[in-house]
């Protein structure tokens, strides 16, 4: 009798699930995250069910069924500020095991994303470094910049087109205006156009994106005006081609061959069409300068173009070409931040080698 | 003067707002983000009208130049033909518009894409000429990598595949990450310069 009672009591005690229900951190609210452990001895699971209720007494509503031993679930679409209770039920070999009830737990929206603290610190430190160099430049401090071959060749490329009496092709990438590479390219376009206005050469700017088209058109027009030659602006020189990636590649390849452009500038974001454009340009004998932050396209440009702006050089180009001390100062800021990141990487590697983990956990 | 100051002010306010928004998961911030995205879509829709106008005008002017006329005629006829098909006969499943898209546009795009194979061969020929130390190293690593990822490499020597993977995962990945760190910093610096109004070239000079 005593043994039977003991066995009955043991069967009623919930195995350890350690079910925890918490408000999902760093979200817009309406979500609760559940975590639990699969109790020992339940290696084979037929079914795992998750139940939710607004009261500890129930009724509990089944909200999800799994056929595998998962240990985490995010309940979404909940009402903020309301109490919720949860339990997990596992069916294994005909036996049903129920977890303890977790709750009450309330879903709430957060005002700060704690997972982004490291990014915020990084951004603040970087901003301070940039501002330091900007103010140093404003005080008249001389800053040395390493020469970038591709940018030094830009004047020569425009001059060559002028001498040959052939147009310059400027491709501002194939991405949208939301891409920083496109904005960097538009900044360079402004410099190039002013130089073109000085040399009285023709520029062709075919566009893939309608918004980029409207911006490049205004930039080219304004650049001709600011260079004192609004008369040189040809409304037909900046135009929209197509939204189709390979349709655009075909059209621009055709322009290079028909117009016999002397200089091709491919600056911005590119995908698979990069090699089609660069190889067609190379076959026409044009001098080609490319620049992109698309790591996978860089080898194609390096192979087929005369000069390539690699990654960050695309972003440095506008400041480099402007010769404005304040703009150039930001390049020194970039270098300083790179140095800082390099030191952090070296320190992290050394600490990692000696099994010290607190430094890595900081990030 | 106002023509420059107003855009700079809008960029500063919106740049600051969207930076702050990144750190706030609250629904207020999400609503603002959605609202800005809707605005972007609205602006893009208006830009499409301007862009199509530019396309038509560009090719219309070119019709008068004999050397460009055939290409521009094809572009204009195709544009209007597809527009008429879409507007008057629908773009649904089985429509002529859909058939034209699937049987003309897609094969043409695929043809352009397939040209890449030939361009890769010509680019590889140029890149792999061992003219200097860098080009020789490139040629060697490309050779090892190509041999290493095919079964033949394993039969020549079992370690070739491991070495090829090492080239891919260590020196290659290190260089890629170096570039990506620089790109990240460059993006941030460019954004900050535009938000603070230091960089004004996007206004045309």
Image (tube, rainbow, N blue to C red):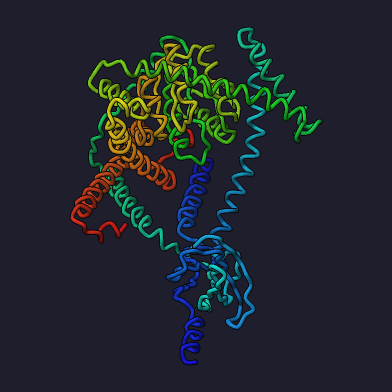
Residue lying furthest front: A1
Asked whether residue A232 appears in the rendered view, the answer is no
Residue lying furthest right: B88
Where is residue B6 drawn, in percent x and y? Answer: 52, 46
Q: Is residue A264 left or right of residue A336?
A: right
Residue shown at 78% from the left, 32% from the top = B87
Q: Quadrant of residue A124?
A: bottom left
Residue shown at 40% from the left, 58% from the top = A116
Q: Is residue A98 above or below residue A142?
A: below
Q: Is residue A40 left or right of residue A152?
A: right
Q: Is residue B61 above or below residue A103?
A: above
Q: Image quadrant for the C terminus of chain B?
A: top left
Q: Quadrant of residue A90?
A: bottom right
Where is residue B54 drawn, in percent x and y? Answer: 63, 26
Residue shown at 56% from the left, 62% from the top = A66
Asked whether residue B132 appears in the rendered view, the answer is yes
Residue lying furthest top: B66
* Foreground residue among B190 and A36: A36
Where is residue A311 drawn, in percent x and y? Answer: 36, 35
Q: Quadrant of residue B81?
A: top right
Number of callouts? 0
Q: Is residue B3 above or below residue B111?
A: below
Q: Is residue A21 above or below residue A286?
A: below
* Foreground residue among A163 and A254: A254
Q: Is residue B5 left or right of residue B168?
A: right
Where is residue A200 drawn, in percent x and y? Answer: 46, 17
* Foreground residue among A180 and A245: A245
């Amino acid at each position: 009798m005593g043994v039977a009672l003991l066995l009955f009591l043991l069967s009623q005690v919930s195995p350890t699930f350690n079910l925890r229900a918490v408000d999902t951190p760093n979200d817009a609210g309406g979500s609760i995250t559940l975590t639990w452990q699969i109790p020992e001895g339940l290696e084979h699971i037929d079914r795992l069910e998750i139940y939710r209720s607004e009261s500890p007494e129930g009724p509990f509503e089944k909200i999800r069924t799994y056929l595998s031993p998962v240990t985490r679930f995010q309940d979404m679409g909940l009402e903020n500020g309301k109490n919720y209770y949860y339990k997990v039920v596992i069916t294994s070999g005909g036996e049903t095991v129920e977890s303890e009830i977790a709750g009450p737990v309330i879903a709430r929206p957060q005002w700060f994303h704690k997972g982004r603290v490291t990014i915020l610190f990084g951004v603040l430190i970087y901003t301070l470094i940039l501002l330091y160099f900007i103010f140093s430049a404003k005080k008249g401090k001389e800053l040395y910049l390493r020469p970038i071959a591709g940018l030094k060749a830009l004047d020569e490329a425009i001059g060559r087109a002028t001498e040959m009496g052939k147009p310059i092709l400027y491709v501002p990438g194939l991405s949208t205006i939301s891409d920083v590479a496109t904005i960097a390219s538009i900044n360079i376009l402004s410099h190039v156009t002013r130089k073109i206005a000085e040399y009285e050469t023709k520029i062709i700017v075919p566009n893939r994106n309608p918004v980029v088209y409207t911006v490049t058109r205004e930039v080219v027009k304004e650049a001709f005006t600011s260079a004192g030659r609004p008369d040189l602006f040809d409304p037909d020189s900046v135009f929209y081609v197509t939204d189709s990636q390979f349709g655009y590649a075909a059209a621009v390849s055709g322009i290079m061959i028909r117009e016999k452009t002397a200089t091709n500038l491919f600056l911005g974001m590119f995908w698979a069409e990069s090699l089609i454009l660069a190889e067609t340009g190379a076959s026409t004998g044009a001098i080609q300068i490319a620049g992109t932050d698309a790591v996978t396209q860089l080898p194609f440009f390096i192979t087929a173009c005369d000069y390539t702006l690699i990654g960050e050089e695309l972003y440095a180009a506008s400041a480099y070409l402007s010769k404005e001390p304040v703009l150039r100062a930001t390049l020194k800021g970039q270098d300083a931040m790179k140095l800082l990141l390099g030191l952090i990487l070296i320190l992290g590697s050394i600490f990692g080698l000696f099994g010290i983990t607190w430094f890595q956990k900081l990030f | 003067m106002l023509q420059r100051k107003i855009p700079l002010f809008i960029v500063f306010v919106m740049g600051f707002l969207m930076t702050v928004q990144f750190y706030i998961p609250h629904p207020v911030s999400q609503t603002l983000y959605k609202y800005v995205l809707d605005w972007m879509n609205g602006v893009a829709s208006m830009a499409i009208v301007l862009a199509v106008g530019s396309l038509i005008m560009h090719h219309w002017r070119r019709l008068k130049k004999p050397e460009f006329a055939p290409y521009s005629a094809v572009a204009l006829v195709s544009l209007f033909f597809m527009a008429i098909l879409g507007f008057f006969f629908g773009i649904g499943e089985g429509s002529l518009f859909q058939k034209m898209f699937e049987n003309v546009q897609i094969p043409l795009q695929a043809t352009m894409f397939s040209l890449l194979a030939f361009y890769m061969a010509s680019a590889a020929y140029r890149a792999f000429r061992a003219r200097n130390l860098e080009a020789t190293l490139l040629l060697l690593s490309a050779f090892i990598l190509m041999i290493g990822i095919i079964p033949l490499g394993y039969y020549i020597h079992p370690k070739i595949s491991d070495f090829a993977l090492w080239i891919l995962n260590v020196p290659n990945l290190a260089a890629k990450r170096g570039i990506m760190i620089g790109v990240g910093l460059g993006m941030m610096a460019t954004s900050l310069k535009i938000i603070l109004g230091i960089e004004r070239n996007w206004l045309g000079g």
